[in-house]
Image (cartoon, rainbow, N blue to C red):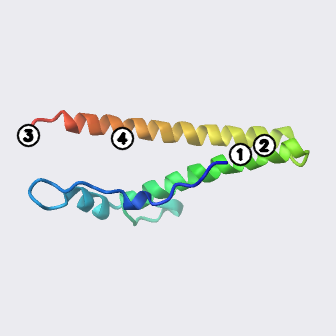
Amino acid sequence: MISGIGGIGSLPLKPEIGGTDAATDLFQGTKAPMAGGEIGGTFAEALSQAASKTVNTLQNAEQVSIQALKGDADTRQVVDAVMSAQQALQTTIAIRDKVVSAYLEISRMGI
């Protein structure tokens, strides 16, 4: 079974050399659009919500597939759930690739 992502907001962030924690300030001060179009929350909260939504989509696809094996769901429901899970996973992978690419670009910058 797929388990949820817990504690993503408590990821340890390394403080800046000068002693101030710019990474934490970046995540805490950034406002990101939330569900329903309202503005608020931090980048870490938005990322956590997106990860939770992806996990829920994958768990739903798994549950619908199990229901189909029991004979309680039809093929169309299974296909819809699996396609939603596939789209959510591809989106998550694309976001991960962009974050890794940005990290590598920043790490190559001269000081």
Q: Quadrant of the C terminus?
A: top left
| Tag 1 residue | 61
Disc 4 to disc 3, C-alpha distance: 21 Å
Q: Which of marks 4 and 2 is in front?
A: 2
Marks 3/1: CA–CA distance: 47 Å
Give yes or no for contact between labels 2 and 1 (Cβ–Cβ under 8 Å). yes
Local secondary structure at mark 1? helix
Q: What element carries label 4?
A: helix
Sequence-first tag of 4 and 1: 1
Residue type, label 2 = Ser
Query: Along the line of sight, which residue is nearer the eye, 68 or 90?
Result: 68
Q: Mark 2 points at which residue?
A: 65
Label 1 amino acid? Ala
Label 2 with label 3: CB-CB less than 8 Å: no
Mark 4 and mark 1 residues within 8 Å of each other at the beta carbon: no
Residue sitting nearer the eye, 39 or 103: 103
Image side of residue 49 versus residue 40, left or right: right
Q: Disc 2 versus disc 1: distance between alpha carbons?
A: 6 Å
Q: Which residue lies under the disc numbered 3?
A: 111
* Left or right placement of residue 70 versus residue 48 in this view: right
In this figure, which residue is indicated by the disc labeled 4? Answer: 99
Q: Distance between the residues labelled 4 and 1?
A: 26 Å
Q: Is residue 32 visible?
A: no
Distance, label 4 to label 2, CA atoms, is: 32 Å
Q: Is mark 3 on a helix, strand or loop?
A: loop
Q: What residue type is labelled 3?
A: Ile
The local secondary structure at tag 2 comes to helix
